[in-house]
Amino acid sequence: MPKSHKNKENLRNEFALNLCVKLISVALTMVLMAVMILNAPILSYTDTDNFNKISQISITKYFKTRKPMQYLEGNITRLKTQDLNIREDIDQDFNDGLDLKQTIEGQFTILFLGFDSDDNGSGSLHDVNYLIQFNLLTASMNILQIPRDTYMPYYTNSSTGKFNSIYTHGNKEKSNIQRVVDCVQENFGVPVDAYVTTTCDNVAEIVDIVGGVPIDMPYPVVFEADKVIPDGEQILSGEESEWFLRFRYGYQNGDIGRVQAQRIFMVAAMKKAISMNTVQIFNAVNKIYKQELIATDLSMEDISRIADLAGTIAMENVNIFMLPGESAMAGDQSIWSVHKSATLEILNEHFRTQQIKLTDKKSAIVEYITEENYKNTDYDDMSANFQDIDDGEKGNNPQLNSSYKNKYDADYEN
């Protein structure tokens, strides 16, 4: 090849190399500029949880800390420091590193309310009620199930006097969510740090967003004639999950059987969540936010931290309890009458681990049936851990009534 041609080719190669270097340099510069802009404190941000304090934050921080679903329910007022009754031996300067707005360092408590369906109910009754507490000191999670019929007459104007009516029929001077938070905090002495609310219909959509929930059904569910979930291993769709969570008429103990069934679903849902990677979780949460399937005062960043925390807790350290009590009739209403002593024992041992023990006089719990007149104490200790539930240990599955079993055998087994 002539020397002039070689020189031209070398020049072209050098030009291409220089152009490539320049393009990469420009691209890197643009990336760096974007990172600097996104992380520079250039936005005015009003923190409604901190007395409407205005501060300058970055665009990245804004998207992490924003609470797009908070406007649906608003803020909540937590217990005051002087009302917490922290034990003297607890280190007040302890920092658990969770970096969330916690009432008590070392624990984080969420109130979860699941409302009935607009199509099959009023849409205003919270029939599913969980108090979920992460305990960083013991690397555990404790869940208190509050039956919907729990008798709480001083917190609702409804003639039923039931817990599930407080949101709609509680103190008119308070926000809907604050009514329920106040009831929980004053009766159980457990500070609520955050809340999440949703509906049965939305749960179905959420399950579909995450791709269904794998489960080993211990018994068949016939929600309606054409809505059947067989027993055995399968992946529940959103619609099937709703049938399972709402089903109760086949259980010997009605709502209590449904409470036990919800535990089975919770274990399966937790295993599903643990199996998802970070990208899958982010995409799912993003869709849930966009479709407004939940209301919460938790930010995207808060949820990410809580998800990371939950992933570190072993199944045998996730404990679930049902509010002790017994069924009773208050006039023409079927209610759940709380057993106060048994309830205080659970609260003090598992949910108030850093606080002075809650006594009978300090708790606002009302017993419709007093202790000397109890007729049934079988449900005073309905505790279990997720590992035992997942293993199908006896006593963790609801009991089916004979008429339901006979009907299923006759109509569907073959």
Image: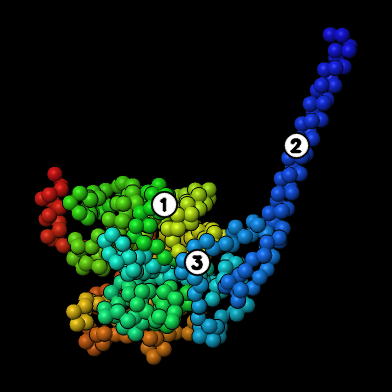
How far apart in space, not on screen, are marks 3 and 1 (Cα)?
29 Å
Q: Position of residue 189 (x, y in %)?
A: 44, 81
Where does the image place residue 138, in percent across and percent down from the top left?
50, 69
Instruction: From the viewer's side, name the closer residue of 390 and 158.
Output: 158
Q: In which image quadrant can residue 92 be found?
A: bottom right
Q: Which label sits in the foreground, 3 or 2?
A: 3
Q: Secondary structure at mark 3?
A: helix
Left-right relation of 66 to 212: right
Real-space Cα separation, disc 1 to disc 2, in angstroms: 42 Å
One can see residue 328 in this view = yes
Q: Name the residue rendered at 60%, 76% in the picture.
A: 51
How far across and down, in percent of the image, does residue 337 sit?
A: 27, 80
Quadrant containing the N terminus in the rendered view:
top right
Q: Nearer the viewer, residue 86 or 161?
A: 161
Dot 2: element: helix
Q: Quadrant of residue 53?
A: bottom right
Tell me the number on the disc at residue 24. Answer: 2
Give neighbour class at mark 1: few <14, some 14-19, many 20+ (Cα, 10 Å): some
User: Looking at this rendering, what residue extends furthest in the top direction?
Assistant: 1
Circle 1 residue:
272
Q: Residue furthest bottom?
A: 361
Residue 71 numbered mark, or none: 3
Question: Of marks 1 and 2, which one's residue comes earlier in the chain?
Answer: 2
Q: Using residue 2 as the reference point, say whether residue 24 is left or right of it.
A: left
Disc 1, SS: helix
Q: Amino acid at mark 3?
A: Tyr
**Amino acid of disc 2:** Ile
Q: Residue at position x 82%, y 17% from top? A: 9
User: How many residues crowd mark 2 within 10 Å: few (<14), some (14–19), many (20+)?
Assistant: few
